[in-house]
Image (cartoon, helix red, strand yellow):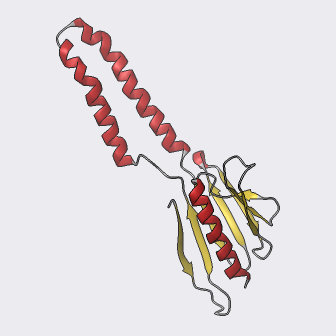
Amino acid sequence: MPYQWLSPEPSPDLSQPDSSHLRLWPYRSLPRRGFVWFIGGTSALIALPLVAVLGSPVLWGLLPFLVLAVAGIWFALQRSYRDAEIVEDLTLTPALVTLTRHGPRNRHAQWQANPHWVRVEMHATGGPVPHYLTLHGGPRPVEIGAFLSEEERVALSAELRAAFALHKG
């Protein structure tokens, strides 16, 4: 799953539950290693028909277009990687819940609330994505994990409810 509960930090007061930390990130269907193989394979397959025109002026007519095609794929995939540089960090302590979103191009947003008042809401329909997951209880409702799949948001919803129930006592 593209989210992970990190090891809890021990609480100085043993009567209070430890803090919980959740990190979420978007799923990558093409990791960096696969990107290298994909670009290499694409270049080889595009260059294969050029073997027939080696030594002729047709090669120089086709070559710029093939290079542009590979460069376009390279640029599009790099742009996709930059746009998906999203990490959401949820820190849950007995006194405060903090959600920090680190977005692409150094954009940051932070949301804080008292965990006693926070409730996890799953909107099966009506949101920008099916099974839209929000946290209510702070200055405004905030989405969490919009980049996750439907099944992952449903599973995360149950885990968040359990974590908040543990911290509420």
User: On the picture, is 53 further left or further right than 101?
Assistant: left
Q: Is residue 80 above or below residue 43?
A: below
At horizontal 54% and vertical 47% (from top left) the residue drawn is 84
In the image, 5: left or right of 92? left
Give coordinates of residue 34: x percent, y percent: 35, 45
Residue lying furthest left: 55
Residue 40 against residue 47 in the figure, above or below: below
Q: Is residue 164 left or right of residue 56?
A: right
Q: Position of residue 48 (x, y in %)?
A: 23, 24
Q: Give the quadrant of residue 105.
A: top right
Query: What residue is rendered at 40% in x and 49% in y?
Result: 31
Quadrant of the image occupied by residue 119: bottom right
The quadrant of the image that shows the C terminus is: bottom right
Against 17, residue 112 (above or below) is: above
Depicted 14 relative to depicted 43: above or below: below
Residue at the far front in the pictured view: 124
**Residue 54's x, y, as percent?**
18, 14
Please state the total of marks drawn on the protein image. Answer: 0
For the point 75% across and 74% down, the residue is 115
Quadrant housing residue 61: top left
Residue at the far right: name it: 139
Q: Residue at x 61, y 59 (%)?
A: 153
